[in-house]
Image: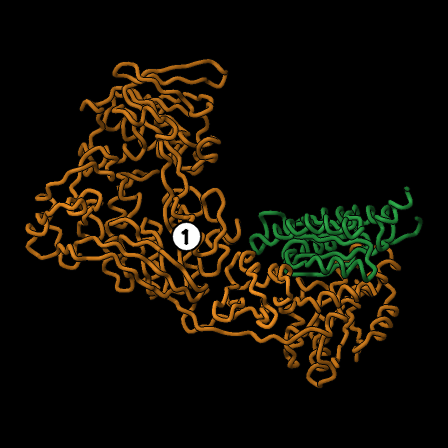
Amino acid sequence: MSGFEPKIVTFLCNWCSYEGADKSGNAHLESPANILPIKVMCSGRVEPQFVLEALKNGADGVLILGCHPGDCHYKEGNYKTLRRQIILEQFLEEMSINPQRVRLDWVSAGEGEKYAEVTKEMTERVKELGPFKAYELKQKENASV
Amino acid sequence: MSKIGVYICKCSGNISDSLKFEELKKAAEEMEDVVVVREHELYCGQEGQDVITKDVAEGIVDRVVTVACSPKMHDKTFIGASKRGGLNPYLLHMVNIREQCIWMTPDKDRATEKVIRMMKGGIKRAKYLEALEQKEIEINTDVMVIGGGIAGVEAALELANAGRKVYLVEKEAAFGGYIVKLEHTYPSGECAPCILAPRMKELVENENITLLPLTQVKKVTGFGGNFLVEVEEKASFVKAESCIGCMMCIEECPVEGKNAFNGNMNNRKAIDFLVPGTVPKAPYINREMCKRFKGEECTICKDSCDFEAIDYGQEDKIKEIKVGSVIIAIGGRIYEAGKVFPELMKGENNIFTGLDMERFVSTTGPSKGKILLKNGEAPKSVAILHCVGSRNERHLPYCSGICCKYALKHSEGIKEQLPECQVTHIYNDLCLEGKEWQEAVKHLKKEGVKFLRWELGENSIAELNKNGEKIAVSGKNLKGEKESIEVEMVLLAVGLGPNPDLSALAEEFSLSEKEGYIVVRHEKIGGVGTTAEGVYLAGTANGAKDITQSVIEAKAACGEILSTYIPGQKLKLEPAVAESDPDLCGGCKICIKLCPYKAPSFDEEKEVVVVSDVLCKGCGTCVAACPTGAMKAKNYTSKQITSEIEGVLQ
């Protein structure tokens, strides 16, 4: 699909990834405008419900960025996020949503370059997946039958 | 209806030149609840700030949305500007379009589109912002120092001299920790008891310090500024205030057993001093040794005492102590050499650890200062094995950074007492940072001390085998060739491991633990802090280190306490924390399991969770997990976040 510019809601934890995004900007590293940042105090605050709300309201992808495992400002919030992500991915598949649309990654306060990379990769991935439609996996199944 | 003011900063062209500014303004004006949209060349400047202050003060706006730079850059600036006009700081929202869009999006059209989305998200969120009030609570400025080794003693004195009341808690019957076992300290060989004695005297005399020997922390409740610590004080059966230290009871006591203080190399009595000549200046009864604890009737010590200091009726006591902050200064534990050489350490061999050697050379030691083999003769040859139990996955994976130094100290001591004795260091690397040590190695080599560099080996740098009266020490040199020497005595330079009691303390104070040690708040700039407010570390609680470094940390921890918990000041509580709605809470307790700070607790009577606004740090992990939606993250409510999601996608 040419000219498709996906909208990717991106949750940034206050202590690492939000700082990492700032660092990326401070260094004027290019990052796609498809990324729509929303700050939370910890990636652990990201309710699965937020991911679904984003998709429902027109997002084509959701990116959750937190502190690296072991570096969480709140000790272990990011581990809880990771645990939740595994279940969320299974749930998305059951909901006929391609779990590839939701990515969890770690960006530290110093990793401006990683922020630029991850946001680029995610944008490329969602561009390939195309615009989000409800029941996308079932439709694909039906089309292949 | 809320009155939202949107303040778009041009950032002196930084922002305005990189997007279609007019489109941005127009989009803001079209948003619901927006009453003013203003632009300024530089909102962070005084003139710009005054615009915001004036709008708030005149009641034109009741919510402020800045569309400008990062809150990491200027949150204090805009909180200040809003506050001066009378706005609650939680009614301000900053949309960070500079760092997180303009500076990373060279395409003007794409940047404009993204900025508008971010701004809409911010405005929609602003509608649901709630004013939050910062609470203040009284603080307790008393301090508990846990661990009465040199780090704890120095911390207690430092704080007491600054006028703080200090409770010094020590598990053993005497204060001093490892340093009381040492005769000389490296690098200069200064006499350890001479360092300690005047400090111990000060400890006893300082009225601000309460000494709690034979005491351990059992339970902790509360938070930084207000802890309630439950300790158990074991009975010593000797009234320290009555005892004059005449030692009559010790002489008369009929029970004799191995003296652990001297590495089991001599005997002690059931009633005895743990350490000769230290604090408290009274002996105690060792329950494992005393006949009375084996059901036998014996009153010899009591009968021998002319001062009625012996009190068999003493009981273990639970005490509750209120303090505002805590220093954990419990020392590390020398790794057990028996785990490296299980068979050899059991038998009557001439294999000793560094600590045994400390007792040998001590005038209060088992041989009254003489280095002796088990047969009572002086050794003619000694091999000193480095890295025993260190740098090995089976034992301690790290380098303790102290063993090479004390090994060199001991070789110096041996050569001093026995100049003819052949001393050989078997090492892999010499970990000797600091200005004194290279010179020391040169000096030892001149004295005839040998240095053999071998491979670390699977279990240890060398294998030890008994060969008659001698010990064969064999290993591989760095070329991979086998080498072997025979000596009369082997000295093991064993590493320092974590204190097993750290785990229980970490649990009670909700601290993070890694490989048996407590994790510091920040490696570089928070080296004596922990992840819990009000809990600090000194010495080996966060890793192996020597006396010098331990004392430096003790003083650093005191500095943090003195500048954080100041008499007369109140503790400001962060209001953006979690709160549970009792009408919605189903009592599932998932939040309690998730919280690393023990902030939520269960009210058994009402059968709902309540969150301590003091313990909660506001991460929101419990909120995300709450199945009934009872848990709310103030300033990051689900409504606020979903409104922002809707806004950016609008």
| Mark 1, secondary structure of its residue | helix
User: In the picture, which chain is orange?
Assistant: B
Where's the C terminus of chain B, which quadrant? Answer: bottom right
User: For the residue marked with disc 1, what is the amino acid?
Assistant: Leu
Q: Is residue B157 visible?
A: no
Mark 1 packing: few (<14 Cα in 10 Å), some, or many (20+)? many
Front residue of B290/B154: it is: B290
Q: Tell which subunit mark 1 falls on.
A: B
Q: Position of residue B585 (x, y in %)?
A: 59, 67
Q: How did the renderer colour the structure? A: by chain
* In front of the other: B130 or B493: B130
Q: Which chain is green?
A: A
State the residue at coordinates (79%, 76%).
B38
**Mark 1 lies on residue:** B505
Residue B281 location (% of width, % of height):
18, 52
Q: Position of residue B399 (x, y in %)?
A: 45, 35
> Can residue A46 be seen in this snapshot?
yes
Q: Quadrant of residue B123?
A: bottom right
Instruction: Describe residue B241's horizontal placement relative to residue B637 as left or right.
Output: left
